[in-house]
Amino acid sequence: MEVVVSGVQAARPEMVAAQIEAVFDGFSPKAVKTGMLGDATLIETVAGELRRWSAGPVVVDPVMVATGSPPADATSSSNSKRLRSRSAPANCSCTSTARSPP
């Protein structure tokens, strides 16, 4: 049985910023891993919050493509560049998900 993503809804940047603040305010994370960062505003928000909190090692896993689903907006050339330049501090490891050729 194949599981297919039938819909995606990005979280509001304000909510994501509040969630990041709650984690860093209540805990001392040793590392951070992102999930889907589907648009430029969300990328900028997460990058700014990670800088604000001086996040330790960061793994950026943008979940740009899911099996059986159309690619997210993050795969656009401008968003891919923004993702790499804004959310990639010196202690960052970026993963990528590329669509396999048919």
Image: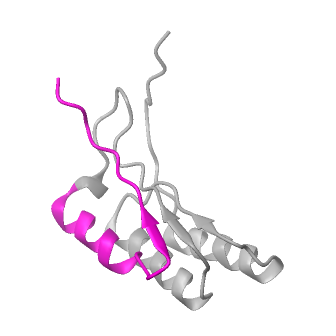
Instruction: State which quarter of the image contains the C terminus.
Output: top left
- Tell whether 17 sits left or right of 78: right
Residue 77 shown in magenta: yes
- In-front residue for pair 14/102: 102
x, y (%) of residue 31? 65, 70
Name the residue located 78 percent from the left edge and 78 percent from the top edge: 28
x, y (%) of residue 58? 54, 70
Name the residue located 41 percent from the left edge and 75 percent from the top edge: 87
**Image position of 65 with respect to 81: above or below:** above
Q: Quadrant of residue 21?
A: bottom right
**Image position of 16 with respect to 73: above or below:** below
Name the residue located 34 percent from the left edge and 63 percent from the top edge: 39
x, y (%) of residue 86? 36, 79
Instruction: Tell me where the magenta segment starts and ends, as one range.
Output: 76-102
**Image position of 5 with respect to 49: above or below:** above
Name the residue located 72 percent from the left edge and 79 percent from the top edge: 24
Residue most extreme to the right: 26
- In-front residue for pair 21/30: 30
x, y (%) of residue 95? 40, 55
Residue 52 shown in magenta: no
Q: How many marks?
A: 0
- Tell whether 78 sits left or right of 73: left
Colour logic: one colour
